[in-house]
Image (cartoon, rainbow, N blue to C red):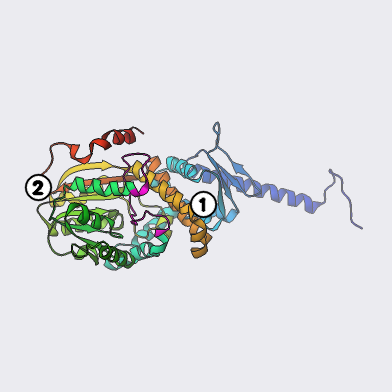
Amino acid sequence: MVPKFTAHQQPAEAGLAAVSQGNSSRFDHWLLEKIYQAAGRPAIRLALSNGPQVSPQNTRPVATVNIRNRRTLFALLLDPDSGFGDAYSDGRITIEGDLVAALEEFHRTTPPLESQSWYSRAVSHCLSLAQRNSLRGAHSNIHRHYDLSNDFFRLWLDSQLIYSCAYFPSVAMSLEDAQAAKMDYICRKLNLQPGERVVDVGSGWGALVLHMARHYGVTARGFSISHEQIVWARRRARELGLDHRVEFVEDDYRNISGKYDAFVSVGMLEHVGAEHYAEMGRVIDRFLERGGRGLLQCIGRNQPRPFSNWVHRRIFPGAYAPSLRQVMDIFEPRDFSILDVENLRLHYARTLECWLERFEAVEGVISARFGPEFVNTWRLYLAGSIAGFRAGTLQLFQVVFARGEYLRLPATRAYLYTDEAKEEHAAVAAV
């Protein structure tokens, strides 16, 4: 016979279970509070599945982060970057609301690196040691990202496969037009002249090298250690009939030979590592002619700070975004003159918005080939990058430099802008 109990007559076992459940709930709430405090108390709601939640006070949450289980809570406490990234990728964390807005809020409230857990800092240090950009290490790091397959990047980049910040003189400009505008902008900053010799370090799929040769009459060499990129670039050169004026070399920048009038590097410095900046300066000094000049474009930061542990593990092994002061370690020892410095971070935010929109449009194709976890990983990477540039935790530096003998420096910056683009450029700057 099954005993019956009134509301005031519970069995001892039921009472103990209720106490245990209450203690568990309080412990989970304590974990959520610790995570929320470590994140800088953003305007985000944290909710444990079928459990407690923590919400911002006196403001409406931008989004809700749903966390599946206590194991994920512990992972978030130990290493917030990797814990969040891995859990989002495999579905243990889901976001209700705008993903980019939520990540932007986290970017704005994340405390300084020294405030992070000892475990997170230790993981960051170990990753930086394991992923150093030596000749062998750089090749391995680049292969893991850029050699995923050309077909993958073709799904969501522009038609020329340009994987770096575009330039939007008009906010309504298409991605294809903005990438062409970026290449012209770089060529004007370099003041390229027909017949000059140019070297592009980290030339990607070759679009800039081909653009310089085709529209500015230079001869150019592109260097990359991504096999997939070099094969693509060489084929494009043949298709355009430019293979007699351009050359794509599958080799490390440290092995560049010859002399050049101009140097350009777009989005490659992030893969060099700050410990190699002085070496990079010596390499440039070795091949740049008297009166030569160059342009370097890279993702940067306001202060020295490593990429997140998750980005290092899942997206860009060995990557580092320098402060502007660290970039100067390339130029100052060689006595290069800095001619121009510009920050295009909002242009990169817009570029990434275009990429994410295209990525989402082909999500099913990517998922069928690589799986849903891969889709979540890349979605988080693209959305997080947008958030970083919007919030200002990431910058996009363009630095133009020259030897002291360079004498063709224009008197004003007017040469950078066409008459039609001046008003549009001012409008973008105002936004």
- Circle 2 — which element? loop
Kindly tell me whether residue 57 is visible in this rendering: yes
* Mark sitting earlier along the chain (1/2): 1
Above or below residue 356? Residue 142 is below
Question: Is 412 or 216 nearer to us in this picture?
Answer: 216
- Please tell me whether mark 1 or mark 2 is closer to you in this view: 2
Residue bearing mark 1: 76
- Circle 1 — which element? helix
Disc ID at residue 151 = none
Name the residue type under label 1: Leu
Q: Is residue 176 shown left or right of residue 380? A: left
Q: Does the magenta stretch include residue 166?
A: yes
Name the residue type under label 2: Tyr
How packed mark 1 is, by other alpha carbons closer than 10 Å (few <14, some 14-19, many 20 or more), is many
Q: Is residue 308 shown left or right of residue 210? A: right
Disc ID at residue 406 = 2
Above or below residue 155? Residue 135 is below
Between the C-alphas of marks 1 and 2, the distance is 53 Å
Look at the image and tell me in which quarter the C terminus lies: top left
Q: Is residue 34 magenta?
A: no
Q: Which residue is drawn at 23% across and 55% down?
A: 277
Image coordinates of residue 231 in percent, x first then y, are: 30, 67
- Magenta stretch, residue numbers: 154-176
Q: Is residue 255 shown left or right of residue 101? A: left
Q: Which residue is drawn at 52% across and 54% down?
A: 88
Above or below residue 27? Residue 219 is below
Question: Is 197 or 270 nearer to us in this picture?
Answer: 197
Look at the image and tell me in which quarter the N terminus lies: bottom right
Image coordinates of residue 244 in percent, x first then y, are: 18, 65
